[in-house]
Image (cartoon, rainbow, N blue to C red):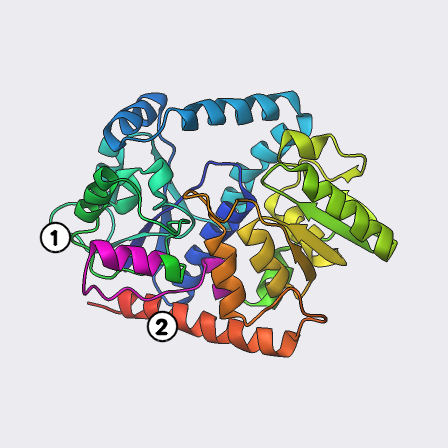
Amino acid sequence: MHVGILTFLHNDNYGSALQAYALQKAISSLGAQAEHMDYAPSRWEKARNLLQSGNSPRLVLEGIRKREVRARQAGAQRKAASFTPFYQRHMRLSPRCASHGALKRQAAQYDLLLCGSDQIWSPTWLNPAYFLDFAAPGQRKAAYAPSLGIKTLPSPRKQRRMTGLLQGFERLSVREAEGKTLLQTLLPGAEIPVLPDPVCLLTREEWLALAELPHRKHPFILCYFLGESPAYWARVKRLAERTGLRVKVIPVTEEGYCQPYDLCEGLSPEEFLGYLAEAAIVCTDSFHGAVFSTLLQKEFEIFRRYREEDPASRNSRIDHLLRALELDRDEGEIPWERVSAHLKELRQEGLTFLRTLVEEK
């Protein structure tokens, strides 16, 4: 069976790249031929989607701001340049698809289309392509653990749009319980299991085999923040003073680049894993920062990136992970044996779902 996967590949994000790697590796382990559809929408495609999906123009402005930050930082440019070699070393990608037409032509090569995971179904930046709307009539399509990343339904217009896009899926699933509740509001009676992020489909040993360790001589606190807040750094300073540990930062934001700590710039995805694997404590507001900390058995501190009352808050992703692993970060030492048992259960649930798809004749 030939499986075509669609997810985020070109947002210069470690979590996105590594979850894509994990999903392809997991499907291949089940005996299918897996390939990611290399979707990199053109500017025209992005503009068309912005107008048709009712997304806020502020998303464009924020994207421009982030690109300007990256352009000023040599380390950010090296990081961005590391993703294509990572895909070439470890994954199978289709020819580049810059438009819906290209996706439709490429989709004809596959027996099954699979979208997932990551926040590909976020109503904030709704893009019909990630709902496989280019699939031919009757073509098999399924969703593996896409995330909506929100707790409340979007505008009525987007609700209607999403309800239409969700039609025709052979199997649906989501990554968080909150997403399941929202989708079942749009599709009453639909069977929508909650499945783990693809990175959970691989074992600790498999991730360590991929990691490039920095081999630092001294234990350190590793900071990986996708948001910006002075309160983050005040808390990091207190933690460093309490533990006596050095602080290292994988910078993403402009604020991250301005900190008086050791900057770990321009890391490849393999090096990103290596720094996580060697850290004594991980400080993060990132879902993938949190989930890799559990997979690699690292002590970690969670930082809340969004206000809880914010309708666009994506804290639900980490909340669901902590519930699934029975983790209370206010408790003392992490019970790693219990966490590992939960991760094993999640891994089996995800692989069982995928197996039913690839073994279907």
The picture places residue 5, in percent across and down from the top left corner, at 34, 50
* Kind of residue at disc 2: Thr
Q: Is residue 331 above or below residue 245?
A: below
Q: Quadrant of residue 357?
A: bottom left
Q: Which residues are magenta?
A: 179-202
Alpha carbon separation for disc pair 1 and 2: 24 Å
Type of amino acid under label 1? Gly
How many dots with numbers? Answer: 2
Mark 2: give few (<14), some (14-19) or many (20+) Cα within 10 Å.
Answer: few
User: Does residue 299 appear to the left or right of 116 in the view shown?
Assistant: right
Residue 194 lies within the magenta run: yes
Secondary structure of the residue carrying numbered label 1: loop
Residue 243 location (% of width, % of height): 85, 57
> From the image, which quarter does the C terminus lie in?
bottom left
The image position of residue 226, as x and y in percent, is 58, 41
Question: In the rendering, which numbered label is found on residue 138?
Answer: 1
Task: Residue 297: say if magenta.
Answer: no
